[in-house]
Image (spheres, grey):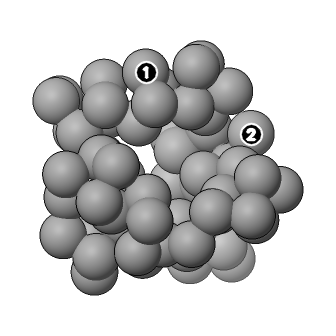
Amino acid sequence: MRFGTYLSTKKISVARAARALEMEHETVRRYARGLRIPRGDAMTKIVDWTNGEVTANDFYKLERKGSARSAA
């Protein structure tokens, strides 16, 4: 599930997620909008915090879609 979808489905604000994940608000906002892919520890925090509902593959699918659009 996309991270942004997860937040909206669970009715969790970006600010609340940022506090829970101990990350900057802007960083979490970019993750939620698919503008940035978390790496390393940030990805682990998100996967753990969402109980595996959001995985690394969910972010990488966004990256591939974006690449395909820019190639067209």
Q: Quadrant of the C terminus?
A: bottom right
Is residue 2 at least partly visible in the picture?
A: yes
- In the displayed structure, does residue 48 sit left or right of residue 61? left
Q: Residue 35 shows which numbered tag?
A: none
Which residue is depicted at the point 28% across and 76% down? 25
Q: Is residue 36 visible?
A: no
Residue occupied by mark 1: 48
Which x, y percent locates residue 31?
43, 62
Image location (x, y in percent) of residue 16: 44, 65
- For the N terminus, the quadrant is top right
Residue 5 percent across, percent down from the top left: 75, 58
Where is 3 relative to 44, above or below?
A: below
Query: Three-letter amino acid code at disc 1?
Result: Asp
Q: Secondary structure at mark 2?
A: loop
Amino acid at pointer 2: Met
In the image, which is nearer the foreground, mark 2 or mark 1? 1
Residue lying at 46% horizontally and 31% vertically, measured from the top left: 49
Residue located 17% across and 29% down the image:
40
Which residue, as the protein is rendered here, is positioned at the far right? 9
Q: Is residue 71 left or right of residue 18?
A: right
In the image, residue 49 above or below residue 68: above
Q: Is 47 on the left-hand or right-hand side of 19?
A: right
Mark seen at residue 1: 2
Nearer the N terminus, badge 2 or badge 1?
Answer: 2
User: With respect to residue 13, does 2 lie above or below?
Assistant: above
Residues 37 and 6: in front is: 6
Q: Nearer the viewer, residue 63 or 7?
A: 7
Residue contact between numbered discs 2 and 1, judged by CB atoms under 8 Å: no
Measured in 3D between alpha carbons, the distance from the residue under mark 2 to the one under mark 1, in whole angstroms, is 14 Å
